[in-house]
Image (spheres, rainbow, N blue to C red):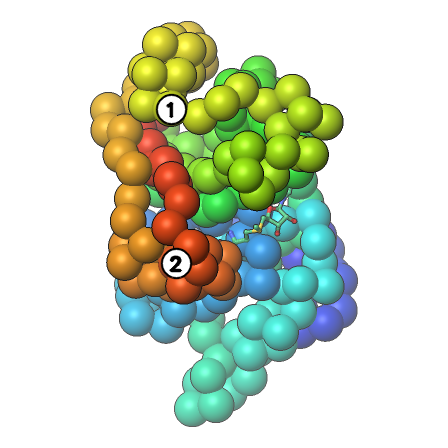
Amino acid sequence: MRILKGKSVVEMTDLNEVLEGFESVIVDIGTGNGRFVYKHAQSNKNNFYIGVDPAAENMMEYASKIIKKPKKGGLNNALYVICGAEELPEEIYSKADKIYINLPWGSLLEGVVKGNDVILENIVKVAKSSQASLEIWFTYNNLHEAGEMSRRELPALSVEYIKDTLVPIYNASGIEINDIEIVTNEELKEFDTQWSKRLGFGRAREVYRIKAVIRK
Ligand SMILES: C[S@@+](CC[C@H](N)C(=O)[O-])C[C@H]1O[C@@H](n2cnc3c(N)ncnc32)[C@H](O)[C@@H]1O
């Protein structure tokens, strides 16, 4: 699989060796600049964090930090993989104890809110054998993203839409949604991703968070 080593793109094959000895593996799909992965890896040294995003350039700042010496912010428990959710590499199959998708846009957002088969299957493939968990934060509305909603034919978001439409689709893929919430701006600020901060300090808007267990 293609990963970032600083600003260079390199092939990595020996992920199993790298993950040896860590308690849990957390995968962040659509990681953006990778801040979430870096911050969590920094404060949870027993866990290994993998950020995944097709936009390599956006991950370069944090990918460069992790290869520094430890006292300069370097980490041995984080990794940035270049790829889209539609084509997750086999090397990360069956590795994740927890999967996050934080404030996606584009095809990832569309896949999540329509329950696209390929995206859901790939989430399940990445999950460890059973009881892995999934957390997705997402938002859009007619006021701010009308163009994207119409271009991608996105449904209006509501708790009812998630309950009535997404829960059964996810369930059929082995993903059991057990919690649906609308989060506050305060929670967004505390969540501490690049976009949660951006949105959290902006105007109040409805941001949905679903939590699920993956059965396989
Ligand atoms: C609004 S940003 C959020 C980034 C980060 N999760 C955060 O909370 O700051 C959306 C991210 O989704 C990524 N994305 C879009 N389509 C994707 C796909 N098909 N697979 C993986 N990531 C995707 C984009 O490259 C972008 O980095």
Q: Is residue 79 left or right of residue 58?
A: left
Q: Residues within 10 Å of mark 2 (few under 14, many from 20)?
A: many
Q: Residue furthest bottom?
A: 71
Q: Residue furthest front?
A: 143
Q: Is residue 64 left or right of residue 139?
A: right
Q: Which label's residue is closer to the chain start, 1 or 2?
A: 1
Placement of 104 over or under 73, stated as above or below:
above
Q: Which residue is mark 2?
A: 200
Q: Residue furthest right?
A: 9
Q: Position of residue 194 (x, y in %)?
A: 49, 63
Q: Is residue 7 visible?
A: yes
- The answer as to whether callout 1 falls within 8 Å of ligand 1 is no
Q: Residue furthest left?
A: 178
Mark 1 to mark 2: distance in Å? 19 Å
Residue 93's mark?
none
Q: Is residue 133 visible?
A: no
- What residue sits 71% from the left and 54% below the top? 55
- What residue sits 32% from the left and 54% below the top? 185
Q: In which quarter of the view is residue 138 placed?
A: top left
Q: Quadrant of the C terminus?
A: top left
Placement of 88 over or under 30, stated as above or below:
above
Residue 158's mark?
1
- Secondary structure category for the residue under label 1: loop
- What residue sits 66% from the left and 57% below the top? 3
Please say if the residues under marks 1 and 2 sit with CB atoms less than 8 Å apart.
no
The three-letter code of the residue at mark 1 reads Ser
The three-letter code of the residue at mark 2 reads Gly
Q: Residues within 10 Å of mark 1 (few under 14, many from 20)?
A: few
